[in-house]
Amino acid sequence: MQTSTCLASFLFCLVMAMALLAGCTAPESTVPVEVAALVTPSATASPLVNTITPTPALWGSFPPPAETPQVSLLPPVERVRLPDGVHAIAVLGSDQEAPYPGRTDAITLALYSTKTAKVSLISIPPDLFVYLPGYTTQRLNIAYSLGGFDLLASALEYTFGIRPEHYVLVHTDDFTHLVRRLNGLVLDVPAAMEGACPGLKSGERLLSAEQVLCYVRYRHGMDELGRSERQLQVMQALVVKLVSSGNLVNLPEWVPEYRDMVETDIFLKDLTSLIPFGLKLG
């Protein structure tokens, strides 16, 4: 995992902005039938009847595997007791266009304190092989497509001891639409990626929506750390662009465009209660 504090206020503003653009509505919990084509064969939904005898000492309050795990399971980590006023939100990026959930190839856990007006970020590698409670061991990035936010939250709680209270899911077309709305992003590209991302040279450059998407999705070999750093870099650039050049005043007219695109369970009343906190973040 990689932690970061320099982007603290930026991520929280992004969560609030995305929730506003989503129209503060929650998605249907039903997973489309087409999702079967988006996951690996080993990620096929497990049988309804558990075939393994529960062992409370191992799985604690979590449901046991529905099929034999591919690796030996460790017991769940001890639940992290967050201080009063500290909350957790999962910010997810899907690898598919709406409405299909796909794999969440960007998983960022934002911990924020309403008392101290501070935010910390944890970038979680989506390819981590973990226990998905009630299913079996699999990559973390398929949890949302199999069981929605509840399964993803349970997997995070089992593995890391922190269960996010809310989430924001952005699809690839949602993402490119927003970047296009902002007329692209200026990013300092550390190295040329022309082989994978056409026209993407090193240096500070104005990238198109398609180039930015390629930039955050690209990974050389197993360099998950590099991809996580680029995702955080783009989050910062997005929010800076949103709060500059008068773009925030355009949010109300953007709501109809994004209401059915961005998925979140953050409602208007939740955002209203966080306005004083957002003002403290500046």
Image: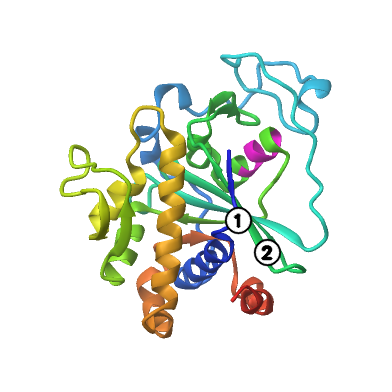
Q: Nearer the viewer, residue 124 or 194?
A: 194
Q: Position of residue 12 (x, y in %)?
A: 57, 64
14 with respect to 160 (left or right): left
Q: Position of residue 69 (x, y in %)?
A: 60, 16
Which residue in the protein does label 2 denote?
Answer: 118
Asked whether the beta carbons under mark 2 and mark 1 sit within 8 Å of each other, the answer is yes
| Residue depicted at 45% across the width and 68% down the height | 239
* Location of residue 62 (image quadrant): top right
Colour logic: rainbow
Query: In the rendered structure, does residue 3 fall within the stretch colored magenta?
Result: no
- Say which quadrant the N terminus sits in: top right
Q: Position of residue 121 (x, y in %)?
A: 59, 52
Q: Nearer the viewer, residue 190 or 261?
A: 190
* Location of residue 161 (image quadrant): top right
In this view of the protein, can residue 127 be seen by the observer? yes
Region of the chain picked out in magenta, as a range: 153-158
| Residue depicted at 82% across the width and 56% down the height | 83
**Mark 2 / mark 1, whichever is N-terminal:** 1
Instruction: Indicate whether 182 appears above or below 44.
Output: below
| Residue depicted at 46% across the width and 68% down the height | 22
- Say which quadrant the C terminus sits in: bottom right
- Three-letter code, disc 2: Lys
- Three-letter code, disc 1: Thr
Q: Position of residue 264 (x, y in %)?
A: 53, 60
Q: Nearer the viewer, residue 210 or 215?
A: 215
